[in-house]
Image (tube, coloured by chain):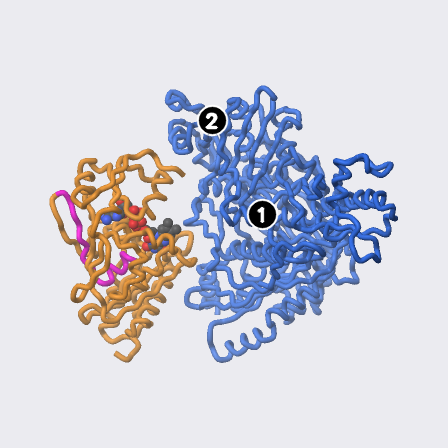
Amino acid sequence: MSDAEDTAGAGGTGSLGRSVRRKEDRRLVTGHGRFVSDLQLPRMRHVAFVRSPMGHARITGVDTAAAVDAGYRVFTGADFAGVVLRARSALPSYVETDQPVLAWGKVRFAGEPVAAVVAGDRYRAEDACELVEVDYDPLPATVCAWAAPQVPVHAAAPDNVLLERRFEAGSVEAAFAAAAVVVERELVTNRHAGNPMECRAGVALWDAAERKLTFWSGTQVPHIVRNMLAELLDLPEGNVRVIAPDVGGGFGVKAVLYPEDVALCLIARGMPGVPVKWVEDRVEHLAAATHARDHRYLISAGFASDGALLGVQADVSCNVGAYSVYPWTAGIEPLMAGGLLSGPYRLDNYRCTVRGVATNTAPSGPYRGVARPASVFAMETVLDAAARELGLSGVDIRRRNLIRPQDIPYTMPSRLVDDSGHYGACLDAALEALGYEQWRAEQARRRAEGGAPIGIGFAVYNELTGLGRAASAGPRMPFRTGHDACTVRVNPDGKVTVFSGVTSQGQGLETTVAQIVADGLGVGYDEVEVRIGDTDTSLWGFGAFSSRQAVIGGGAAHRSAVAVRDKVLALAAGLLEAAVEDLRIEGGQIRVVGEPTPRLSVAEVARVAYLESNRLPAGIEPGLEATQFYDPVRGAFAAGAQAAAVEVDRTTGELRILSYVCVEDAGRVMHPQIVDGQIAGSIAQGIGGALYEHLVYDEDGNLSTGTLLDYLMPTSAEIPELTIGHLARPAANPLGVRGVGEGGTLGPNAVLAGALGDALGVAVDTLPITPATVWSLMRGQEAGS
Amino acid sequence: MKCAPFEYVRAGSVAEAVTVLRDTDGEGKILAGGQSLVPILALRMARPAVLVDVNRIPDLDGVARNDGSVRIGALTRHSALVAQTEHPLLAEAARWIGHAAIRTRGTAGGSIAHADPAAELPAVAVGCGATVHVAGPAGERSVPATELFVGALMTGLGEDEMITGLDLPVPARWGFAEFARRHGDFALVTAVVAEIEGEIRVTVGGAAPVPVRASRAEAVLAAGGPAAEAGRAAAEDLRPTGDLHGSADYRRAIAGEMVRRALAQAGVGTGAN
Ligand SMILES: Cc1cc2nc3c(=O)[nH]c(=O)nc-3n(C[C@H](O)[C@H](O)[C@H](O)COP(=O)(O)OP(=O)(O)OC[C@H]3O[C@@H](n4cnc5c(N)ncnc54)[C@H](O)[C@@H]3O)c2cc1C
């Protein structure tokens, strides 16, 4: 990793751009983190769910008598039948699905909750689950989105298609007619999931006297959860408080409101004054938290003889699982795949049909990079295939087609507007850092003299980050996620407390917001404390997804800090009888331009604002606080390029990554260590998806990879040393930042499949790339030659 | 993922452990390092009525040289197997078991008794021709490792028997090769080569329900054939089943390659002997 300076506890002249010590780390690394599972409340009871052992079945009976006789509280689908989770969208063709809180009538995936029991501890709760008898009448299951449907998952969608949309620009026919080559591929990507270290968790408490619900939840989106719970439980929104304390990873999996969440709140309402807790275990998580990336691309692309990309035609099927995920809808993956398939490449002629297909598998939802690890793989694969046919290098064909700075703003064929154009610069920097020419020479040497084959692979991508109201309009949901709010309060002692709508699952938002506020206000980083994750204290934030928080939540923090700074200066100007324009704040001290010593501190101004109203200048209200929203309206594209050199063991099919490089344009880098951590972590997850992680269902809809013994996550031993570089081209927002939370996941599928193709001359059409698949590809090659 | 209820007994001696096991009529289970048993309990795939904790029984751990073999106590932790120097093949194989936390708790006796077809120690036990010592209510008996393993996760141990230790012959030359998907995973295939009393023994783990001797590979070597040919012979001998991590053909190919690598490490079949 690139070096990140450690300037602990920086005060004084600006903390942005430096790796200041993270605010949250003292508690997190000393074992004082406060996660939902740490919460202990008086009278707390524990919930466990009875889950469907079948992929698709009619429920013919639920017998709770034995559990009730043993003294347990039991809830079944019938108890909560009045509440369903229905993700809404105004897109034509969209079929809404009713997701029950606890299944009744039928179950649609193995692991779906059917009943809930309440007990004194989790052990007894699981004993009680065994006492609940559910009778099932099995139905044929459909697990593959591009196989003929068996019995429809939902009667309202007889073909299982929940959503279909066509993107169309120019004329693909004319483009293909003019093309020197048209490459055509069928590509299948592997279902996998975010798998945060902390699984889902919640505690719900109903205060019957106040008619108030408190829900502690390891969620990425507390305000959205509050809004939806209020609607589903028919409560005034002000009577619902959602608290997301420390959260151990999210990656999108926790940006969903789940039936288990709603069940907990409904159970709590049935047991006033008794906090009910559910902490998901890994088996439940693998089976019933959202999955992702189970796609098929039928893609053709036409190129001129010089490598110019003339047209792309694609048919994309995404397995969206048993329900349209709440509240993001079944459109989340297909719409992203179709909207960004052409990525950072100039393209005029485009036709792409995307569909979300229901199956008897766990619902698909947002997962870091949403759809693009798959769509980038598809696009880069056809580029590599065409390069091979045209006798061009992988580098040349990419350079030939990348969106350039002079093309900006560039309207993509899906009508998204790219504001970056720095793709070529990222690719060049990545090749340089990789030592591209040396690896090519080594590859040639090994080909001539023998030795394990080496291959080089690339991916160039555009990551759409920080979507404002215009850019977030695509899914046509009943809400637009373009803005966040932030409150900056200077306390009477001059220290600063910030109530921000952002949330953190480990990515250090307390630190980032503190840096922004410290610099915006003109006080030291150590003077600022940030509170997040509680809907009773922060005004509004949509939460963590779409690499949005640094841009949007950060923008709101900046605007609020500047507003408070303006008031501090106005007040100081009155006290000093100086002109506002002549005053500067730095490190909490206010000085008059040109004078060597400060005249006043922010603390003295705060004292006047709260305690000495007799000194308040005329026309200035008491208090020092501001709340501002920020909405960037559009989004900020972040350019990125990754490249790697890999070696293949011909005897075992093992891939060894010799060097892995990523160069991204994060815009202005606010905290180098956090930014590099985001990029490294997302590349690691991308490598996991490319080489290891695979959720496999059998024909009956049973999950064959139900524990971490079979679902292989990469460990530190599997992730190579990463070289990370930056291209800091400021974006057009107050802080000049672009999101970096997800981009890293976009590269590895394409990079590693491309490198393997380059090493062996094979075509990688399915993921993940396991030693066994490499070995089969090599055997197929021997058989063919 | 929480265990079903059970009773817990901490045994102070082998005699006490087997007595408790006998009295539970097959409903009892020994708890050693817990690294295989506890996950199974948590998944409720096993629900013994009584757990007999043997961890505090004295004098059941340690590795001691005894002429041509080492005596390994049943409670010897994998980490101690790695650290010992009397049996280098054993040390190398134990290094491949799981991760540090698992090696610190998991025991030699537990690994043998659990009889996972992909586990390292059963393959080494068969590969070196170990003798396993077993105590029961009626007294002690000794079983050759080759007879102890009867199927995947199945041994010839009675429900009231306990492994107390094993004698593992020390090979003159040895090789060990393993292929796993990730660092620390159970093997797809392991190959153990051990020269015991002048005989080259080739054993493959992970490719059958129990570790198996590759007799055709051994014959190739006995006839002076090269390692690569022995590897191919071993592969042809095996009838593995395919699973999520590789087809039967793939496992067979990997087995041949691991045998070749283990032979190369042992310096056998290089044409020089
Ligand atoms: C994440 C993970 C990775 C692992 N990877 C590997 C690996 O790569 N290779 C590998 O070989 N193992 C691996 N293991 C398993 C580990 O090696 C275990 O330690 C071993 O399989 C069992 O030993 P134990 O002492 O923990 O036995 P326990 O789990 O306590 O018991 C296992 C079984 O043996 C019985 N038993 C235990 N001791 C005796 C005895 N003295 N006599 C009779 N019966 C007895 C128990 O009743 C039980 O049925 C892994 C485990 C984990 C959790």
Q: Is residue A436 magenta?
A: no
Looking at the colours in the rendered structure, which chain would you say is drawn in orange? B
Q: Quadrant of the N terminus of chain A?
A: bottom right
Q: Is residue B126 magenta?
A: yes
Numbered disc 1: what chain? Answer: A
Chain A color in figure: blue
Q: Residues within 10 Å of mark 1 (few under 14, many from 20)?
A: some
Q: Is residue A575 left or right of residue A761?
A: right
Residue A116 in picture, x, y percent from top left: 47, 28
What's the residue type where badge 2 is placed? Arg
Q: Is residue A553 left or right of residue B145?
A: right
Most distant residue in the left direction = B138
Marks 2 and 1 sit apart, C-alpha to C-alpha, by 30 Å
- Span colored in magenta: B121-137
Residue B147 in picture, x, y percent from top left: 19, 54
Return the mark for residue A24: 1
Q: Quadrant of residue B83?
A: bottom left
Residue A588 in picture, x, y percent from top left: 73, 50
Q: Nearest the camera: B172 or A102?
A: B172
Helix, strand or loop at disc 2? Answer: loop
Chain-order first, disc 2 or disc 1: 1
Q: Is residue B196 left or right of residue A666?
A: left
Which residue in the structure is indicated by mark 2?
A: A43
